[in-house]
């Protein structure tokens, strides 16, 4: 196998060009086999195989630098830098990350995980290189989906002023996670289909470069004419108008063509954008037909593409989707907004049923929030569905455009808490902290699927800024007999006892129930309470608990700094209440990738660790 000859970076240079296609085929088969077992980002990686190979052929790693936007398409890069064996433990606890990690390899130039950051990071590396007088090539690879994010244009605006080399590769597959939307997508579509420019460039430009000695001077002399031709045959030439040299489109699955255009780009003393066309999921039929499903794939059967262990219970996302559809039917003022995630957030069904009231703004969380504020100011009831770790990108907009004006925007925060295999860039463990700092914000968390439904109904009629945070995965269906009406700032008593009170937030209610049973097994009288609201907290309940209990245990799937537990401690100290508080929360640290249950034990929020901490803390109290 050719793949076995790749043991470290630059080994691909020892592969004969005639064998490139065979190596690409072996890489694809390897990825399909490994991801079918471990799960991971399949579609994006299958589409970037030849593109990555060309980069490794044209560059010299680790001296040269590649920044992968988001980074979920970096699997081939990991293979070509000697990390093939790491795929046995891909995205597992203690194993190889599914994203670029500087601490994992010196060939990973920059840690990524969120969208639209690569051009800014690349520009920083270019400036550092030039200031230090060093010589190496910097390449930022960004997808057309990521190009819908405003940060990419801020970086392009600054890159246009460069007088030294910087290569930007636009990997254009007409997909982010779901199909791309908006003006950028339409513009790129017009370029993809313009054969006149492609034919002109292929037949003249590259051939001139191949002419010994005289080819390159001739190319320089016709540069102005070439730019004029571009303006004629491709209307707008957006990138050139910004001051960024544009090359392409190029077939991203043609390694020879890619290597050639990369060599050309390296000669430029400016920022250069290479427009590359690729196919997401290439080489695997199910991924080609269903690219959104194979963006982040669970383990699957290779022959059919179907999940190996299909989910049997509804997820919180499914519950949200169902309730949104019902609410949309009852109230014509309800509108839904997402940032390139109609499938992931469950809004695809709402889009299909109410297309005029659904808005996918692309990968633009800041715009999504301020757009929702405008909708609310216009008398509508916007529901913004965004993952927890992505919503933090729009913090200023939540403060400035929503909460200062007290506009009735509902934030449906999916993937709150530990999400597992995607690691620290995707763990939704900060939202309670960053949202709690904002005056006028209200925050809820449901204990089970029925409470998510009740909270969403409460939120759309609340008429002030409000957020509902819920976790990834199957919705908890226990404690269904407890369904008190949702009331602002009020918790829910599940079991009444004495001595120790467990006050749990959202997903931690299930864990608290298990701890409750363990404590009861020790003949300890325990009160179990579903907090429901993180802001405002139920001060009246905490005051009442202090009269009969010695220890109050707060439980949340959020970092301890700025979280629910700190708020309770602050209130207890402020009121000088005679009760000790034990906050159970995530440490003030980043949590890496791994199985969620393994991670919970590692960070100390699993039932056994919590039980042991309570027993140790209450030894002298009971």
Image (cartoon, helix red, strand yellow):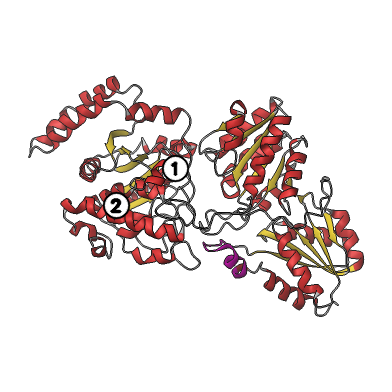
Quadrant location of the C terminus in the rendered image: bottom right
Q: Nearer the viewer, residue 577 or 610?
A: 610
Q: Toward which corner of the image does residue 220 lie, by quadrant?
A: top left
The mark found on residue 133 in the picture is 2
Q: Looking at the image, can residue 455 be seen?
A: yes
Q: Is residue 15 left or right of residue 399?
A: left
Q: Secondary structure at mark 2?
A: loop
Q: Is residue 582 left or right of residue 185?
A: right
Q: Secondary structure at mark 1?
A: loop
Q: Which stretch is magenta?
A: 590-602
Q: Is residue 176 above or below residue 110?
A: above
- Tell me the residue that label 1 is attached to: 290
Determine the residue located farthest toward the front in the rendered image: 303
Give x and y (percent) for residue 181: 48, 32
Q: Residues within 10 Å of mark 2 (few under 14, many from 20)?
A: few
Q: Is residue 201 above or below residue 578?
A: above
Quadrant location of the N terminus in the rendered image: bottom left
Give x and y (percent) for residue 250: 27, 37
Q: Toward which corner of the image does residue 3 lie, by quadrant?
A: bottom left
How many numbered tags mark residues here? 2
Q: Residue at x 81, y 73 (%)?
A: 520
Give x and y (percent) for residue 207: 13, 34
Determine the residue located farthest toward the top in the rendered image: 232
């Amino acid at each position: 196998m050719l793949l076995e000859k790749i043991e470290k970076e630059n080994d691909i240079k020892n592969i004969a060009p005639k064998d490139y296609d065979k190596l690409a085929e072996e890489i694809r088969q390897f990825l399909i086999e490994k991801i079918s077992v471990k799960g991971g980002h399949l579609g994006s990686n299958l589409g970037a195989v030849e593109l990555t190979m060309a980069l490794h052929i044209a560059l010299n790693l680790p001296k040269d630098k590649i920044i992968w936007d988001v980074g979920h398409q970096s699997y081939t890069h990991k293979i070509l830098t000697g990390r093939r064996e790491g795929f046995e433990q891909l995205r597992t606890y203690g194993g190889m990350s599914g994203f670029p990690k500087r601490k994992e390899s010196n060939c990973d130039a920059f840690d990524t995980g969120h969208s639209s950051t690569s051009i800014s990071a690349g520009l920083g590396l270019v400036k550092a290189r030039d200031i230090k007088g060093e010589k190496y090539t910097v390449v930022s690879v960004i997808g057309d989906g990521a190009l819908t994010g405003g940060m990419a244009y801020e970086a392009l605006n600054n890159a246009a002023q460069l007088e030294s080399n910087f290569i930007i590769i636009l990997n254009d597959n007409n997909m982010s996670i779901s199909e791309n939307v908006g003006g950028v997508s339409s513009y790129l579509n017009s370029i993809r289909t313009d054969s006149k420019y492609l034919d002109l460039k292929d037949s003249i430009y590259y051939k001139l470069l191949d002419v010994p000695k005289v080819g390159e001077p001739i190319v320089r002399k016709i540069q102005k004419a070439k730019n004029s031709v571009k303006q004629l045959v491709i209307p707008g030439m957006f990138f050139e108008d910004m001051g960024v040299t544009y090359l392409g489109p190029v077939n991203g699955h043609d390694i020879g063509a890619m290597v050639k255009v990369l060599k050309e780009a390296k000669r430029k003393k400016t920022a250069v954008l290479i427009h590359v066309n690729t196919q997401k999921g290439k080489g695997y039929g199910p991924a080609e037909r269903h690219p959104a499903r194979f963006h982040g794939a669970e383990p699957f059967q290779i022959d059919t593409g179907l999940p190996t262990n299909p989910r049997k219970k509804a997820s919180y996302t499914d519950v949200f989707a169902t309730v949104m559809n019902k609410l949309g039917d009852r109230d014509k003022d309800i509108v839904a907004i997402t940032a390139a995630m109609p499938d992931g957030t469950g809004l695809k069904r709402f889009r299909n049923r109410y297309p005029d009231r659904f808005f996918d703004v692309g990968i633009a969380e800041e715009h999504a929030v301020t757009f929702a504020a405008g909708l609310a100011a216009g008398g509508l009831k916007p529901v913004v569905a965004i993952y927890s770790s992505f919503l933090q990108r729009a913090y200023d907009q939540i403060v400035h455009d929503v909460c200062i004006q007290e506009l009735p925007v509902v934030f449906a925060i999916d993937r709150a808490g530990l999400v597992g295999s995607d690691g620290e860039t995707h763990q939704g463990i900060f939202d309670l902290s960053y949202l709690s700092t904002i005056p006028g914000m209200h925050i809820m968390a449901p204990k089970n699927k029925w409470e998510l439904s009740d909270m969403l109904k409460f939120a759309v009629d609340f008429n002030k800024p409000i957020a509902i945070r819920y976790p990834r995965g199957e919705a908890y269906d226990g404690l269904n007999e407890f369904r008190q009406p949702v009331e602002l700032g009020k918790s829910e008593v599940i079991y009444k006892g004495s001595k120790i009170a467990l006050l749990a937030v959202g997903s931690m209610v299930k864990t608290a129930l298990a701890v409750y049973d363990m404590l009861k097994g020790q003949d300890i009288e325990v009160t179990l309470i579903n907090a429901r609201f993180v802001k405002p907290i139920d001060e009246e309940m905490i005051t009442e608990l202090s009269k009969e209990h010695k220890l109050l245990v707060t439980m949340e799937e959020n970092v301890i700094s700025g979280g629910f537990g700190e708020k309770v401690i602050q209130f207890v100290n402020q009121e000088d209440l005679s009760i000790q508080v034990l906050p159970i929360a995530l440490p003030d640290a980043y949590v890496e990738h791994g199985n969620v249950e393994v991670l919970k034990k590692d960070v100390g929020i699993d039932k056994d660790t919590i039980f042991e901490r309570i027993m140790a803390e209450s030894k002298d109290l009971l």
